[in-house]
Image (tube, rainbow, N blue to C red):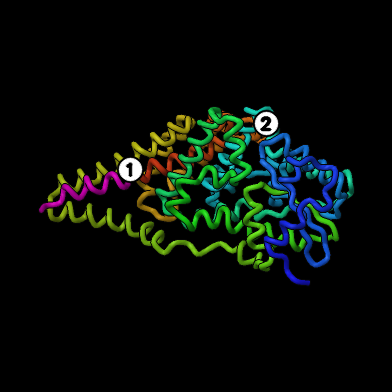
Amino acid sequence: MEQETPQNQEALQGQDNEGLGADEKRDVLELEYEGRRIVIVGTAHVSSQSALLVKKVIAIEKPDTVCVELCASRMATITDPQAWRNMDMVQVIKQKRAYLLLSHLLLSSFQRRIADKLGVQAGAELFAAVEAAKEVDAFVQASDREIRVTLARAWRLMGFWAKVKLLFQFLGAVAESSELTEEDVEALKKKDVLELMLDELGQAMPALRSVLIDERDRFLAEKIRTAPGKKIVAVVGAGHVPGIMRYWGQPQNIAALEVLPPRSKILPVLKWGLPLLVVLLVTSGFVWAGKEAGTQMLVWWVGLNALMAGLGATAALAHPLTILSAVIAAPLTSANPTIAAGWVAGLCEAWLRKPQVCDMEAIPRDISSFKGFWRNKITRILLVVVLTNLGSAIGTFGALPLMIRLLPT
């Protein structure tokens, strides 16, 4: 069978969707692929109208399979609200996933706050799709790439300061989301939530936009095209529909889209080069500038690392002993590339303020408010890791020029 093109795909729209209103038909695209009927519903993730449309389309079509713009782990949070109970914070820190998890939660928070403001459930149309699929005995397929893979692929493309900018951009979006109007929400029908939050960063880093948006369009297109059954309904954010159409007739290598790119070669150089540079500076200070200059270099190095790491932990509202551990660990870990001050502080915080089941259960509620990130023990641990590491990095880079100035000219 000849592959459909975007032009003749659009011509199919409206042929068999009787029972839908004119406004609803604009968000429904009907396709055929290898003799199978595929109906794509473009939605806004914080729209009650989208949830109603999804229910109606599934009830009319009675598909064999319903594809949803969710990865397996995100779908688990819908089908099993208690999935958070299985999270091991110690392993999250040890596996260096604190930044990724915090980014994911901040992204979820942005979407949830918009939904709360409008009095709807975040991702209501996806929940409606899962429930409606059960009513017609349809198979539900999670068709999006794992969020951890998407964020990890993006993370590998960014340098340290780009990651910091991204986190603060997420925090800023969460803080400002209460000012969004219903007109702003309509923009979500044209753009992915990630794209909406990352416009500025995406313009500066096209490769980042490609990972977060374009690759997911390719992934979704392939998963929907190859979904089992003769009749399929796919529920995706409307911002993904043009991209899905762009790749519809082009088979995609799913496995290649899930491979993590190699780590930057610069990072190991910095991790080992900075401690070596510090040792050389201090040694040079003692040899060429005298004992006083060498001692002053050590004071700058230890003092700024300890101070900034401590301030980072304090900003996360860490336990006093956690702050002390950050202060003590920062100068030592900055000279040791195999460990970070934030990991030490995060593990200390997890031990001193052990997360309980109620903290796991409260994550969906707490991330709906800016203050909730500091109130919940789990998200506070993530903040401790991130802000302590940030403080230590600032202390490291701040101390170097002060140390260099002490060398004889």
Q: Residue at x 62, y 51 (%)?
A: 147
Residue 323, image quadrant: top left
The answer to whether residue 109 is seen in the rendering is no
Type of amino acid at the residue the image marks with label 1: Gly
Look at the image and say whether residue 400 sits in the magenta stretch: yes
Residue 275 in picture, x, y percent from top left = 32, 55
Residue 313 in picture, x, y percent from top left = 44, 35
For the N terminus, give its image quadrant.
bottom right
Q: Residue at x 45, y 29 (%)?
A: 320
Label 1 vs 2, first from the N-terminus: 2
Q: Is residue 63 above or below residue 81?
A: below
Residue 356, image quadrant: top right
Q: Relative to 34, is 321 on the left or the right?
A: left
Q: Which residues are magenta?
A: 395-409
Q: Secondary structure at mark 2?
A: helix
Q: Residues within 10 Å of mark 1 (few under 14, many from 20)?
A: many
Numbered tag placed on residue 181 in the rendering: none
Residue 266 in picture, x, y percent from top left = 39, 61
Q: Residue at x 56, y 52 (%)?
A: 151
Q: Is residue 218 above or below residue 339?
A: below
> Residue beneath label 1, please?
395
Main SS, magenta residues:
helix
Q: CA distance from mark 1 to mark 2?
A: 36 Å
Q: Residue at x 55, y 38 (%)?
A: 350
Residue 291 in picture, x, y percent from top left = 15, 48
> Residue beneath label 2, please?
358
The answer to whether residue 4 is seen in the rendering is yes
Q: How many marks?
A: 2
Look at the image and say whether residue 134 sits in the magenta stretch: no
